[in-house]
Amino acid sequence: MLSYTGGIVLVAALLHASWNAMLHGNRDRFLSMTWMSIAIAAVSTVVVLFTPAPPGASLPYLVASGLVHIFYNMSLVRSYRSNDLALAYPIARGSSPLLVTLGAALFAHEAIGPLHGLGIVMISGGIIAIALRGRHVSRAGALAALTTGATIALYTVIDGIGVRLSDGHALTYTAWMFMFYWLMPVLFVALRGVAPLCKPVVTEPLSVGSSLIGGLVSLAAYGIVIWALQSGAMGAVSALRETSVVFAVLIGRMVLGEAVSGARWLACVVVAAGAVCLGL
């Protein structure tokens, strides 16, 4: 992967870890995810109004990705109910690069060199080690996190193929795909009603505000990834993006007060070394 693209994806990794920390730090994560989704969908709506429609060939992919993203959001909320950020996040993110590489090989006929393959394995292995070292993982918690990882891999491969069929209109593709995030408030209202969604605007404005900011950060983070998927190998982009877990460990330690062992720090070094392999 070109160093410029890799550097931009690393910025996306930092942004991604940041919005996950925002989500995890809020007491009601379903509510927080819904307000994040409202921010994402609102900005996407504005972009859609001022950009041309995406090419027809990319439409099935952006529709499929939009629906998978909604399932991903709900899976992520469920994962955070039973795991702290330093555990649930790495399991979910660490399981996806290898799956993305496999999916890209099967459906996009992508080949990857030995060095980049080693980098992907190091990143995935290091991330899983960060999550599992010295920790007890319940069956339900592990299943929720792994389900989240599978949805990450699925939408990444879908978007990798879809954006390449968009004739270079990554912004248009991204905005139309994120329009499906309007389904999140619809789902929230269907399950809880209108009042629980609107009341926090008055009673907990800071929480709602942080969720809206988190949504904008999330939009920027994944928009960068979709841009990179136009030309970068899907597995490499995914693996480099998942170095966000190192940022998540730092945020979990410095902001959320979560304990980090020496073994976990060593695993972070392995992840960083894997990122270096992808940059060569």
Image (spheres, grey):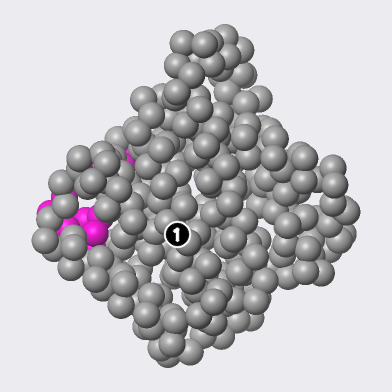
Q: Which of the 4 image quarters holds residue 191? A: top right
Q: Nearer the viewer, residue 44 or 29?
A: 44
Image coordinates of residue 21 in percent, x first then y, are 37, 42
Q: Which residue is mark 1?
A: 13
User: Does 276 appear above or below 194?
Assistant: below
Image coordinates of residue 22 in percent, x first then y, are 41, 38
Dot 1: within a 10 Å radius of its alpha carbon, few (fewer than 14), some, or many (20 or more) residues?
many
For numbered disc 1, what is the local secondary structure?
Answer: helix
Residue plotted at (53% across, 67% down)? 8
Q: In the image, is 37 to the left or to the right of 268?
A: right
| Magenta-drawn stretch contains 73 | no
Q: Residue furthest bottom?
A: 114
Image coordinates of residue 85 in percent, x first then y, are 31, 44
Q: In the image, is 181 to the left or to the right of 27?
A: right
User: Does 161 appear above or below 136?
Assistant: below
Image coordinates of residue 1 in percent, x first then y, are 52, 81
Instruction: Give the magenta range.
Output: 129-141
User: Does 55 appear above or below 199?
Assistant: below
Q: Which of the 4 image quarters holds residue 71? A: top right
Q: Say what amino acid the circle numbered 1 marks.
A: Ala
Q: In the image, is 204 to the left or to the right of 42?
A: left
Residue plotted at (43% across, 87% down)? 280
| Magenta-drawn stretch contains 135 | yes
Residue plotted at (49% across, 32% down)? 211
